[in-house]
Image (cartoon, rainbow, N blue to C red):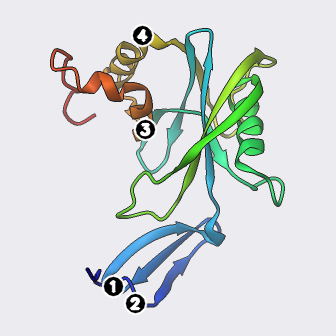
């Protein structure tokens, strides 16, 4: 089987400080400058999960997400696990005793080449308020695992966007034929 454009040369059409617009054959897509990856943190503590909510300019509204950040944006050679520990504490105020990489994933592979490593954080201790850097305005939510679907539905109903990575917490519930469908436009 041959894939159209797979062997075409890659061309950078535009490059900013953080993102590049690329073209390969007929395909146009976005990537991070230098191939920078992200670490996304699944932080579970005593049957609760730690979520963050912050304004996202591309969406024009706040978004409910798992804590995350760029690998190596503060220290060259940083691992995904080290980045996850740093971002978890900065964004949420929780410090983890241990982290485990669960694998690499791609959120929108038809449009973005960005890869993220999902990292599970365990043994959490509250050491600060979180909230990220002063310009991030992050709200931290500690949500019971058995109440995640209801919490997400409540936030969505109030106009908050929901990051696709939350499907890691909602996935099996979405297969339940008795579950209420998600509201359109959310």
User: Is residue 179 left or right of 128 when viewed as pictured?
Assistant: left
| SS state under label 2 | loop
Disc sitting over residue 5 in the figure: 1
Q: Can residue 133 be seen in this view?
A: no
Q: Which sits earlier in the primary sequence, circle 3 or circle 4?
A: 4
Q: Disc 1 versus disc 3: distance between alpha carbons?
A: 30 Å
Disc sitting over residue 43 in the figure: none
| SS state under label 3 | loop
Nearest the viewer among 166 and 53 is 166
Closer to us: mark 1 or mark 3?
A: 1
Q: Disc 1 versus disc 2: distance between alpha carbons?
A: 5 Å
Q: Which sits earlier in the primary sequence, circle 4 or circle 2?
A: 2
Q: Is 21 situated above or below 163?
A: below
Q: Disc 1 versus disc 4: distance between alpha carbons?
A: 45 Å
Q: Which sits earlier in the primary sequence, circle 1 or circle 4?
A: 1
Quarter of the image where the C terminus is located: top left
């Amino acid at each position: 089987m041959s894939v159209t454009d797979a062997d075409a040369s890659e061309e950078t059409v535009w490059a900013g400080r953080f993102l590049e617009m690329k073209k390969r054959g007929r395909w146009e897509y976005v990537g991070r400058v230098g191939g920078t990856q992200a670490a996304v943190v699944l932080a579970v503590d005593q049957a609760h999960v730690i979520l963050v909510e912050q304004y996202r300019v591309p969406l024009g509204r706040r978004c409910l997400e798992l804590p995350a950040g760029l690998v190596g944006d503060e220290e060259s050679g940083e691992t995904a696990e080290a980045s996850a520990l740093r971002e978890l504490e900065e964004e949420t105020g929780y410090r983890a005793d241990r982290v485990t990489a669960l694998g690499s994933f791609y959120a929108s592979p038809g449009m973005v080449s960005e890869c993220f490593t999902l990292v599970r954080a365990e043994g959490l201790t509250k050491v600060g308020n979180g909230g990220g850097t002063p310009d991030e305005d992050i709200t931290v939510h500690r949500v019971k695992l058995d109440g995640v679907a209801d919490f997400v539905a409540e936030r969505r109903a109030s106009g908050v966007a929901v990051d696709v990575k939350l499907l890691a917490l909602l996935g099996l519930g979405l297969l339940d034929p008795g579950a209420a469908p998600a509201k359109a436009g959310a």
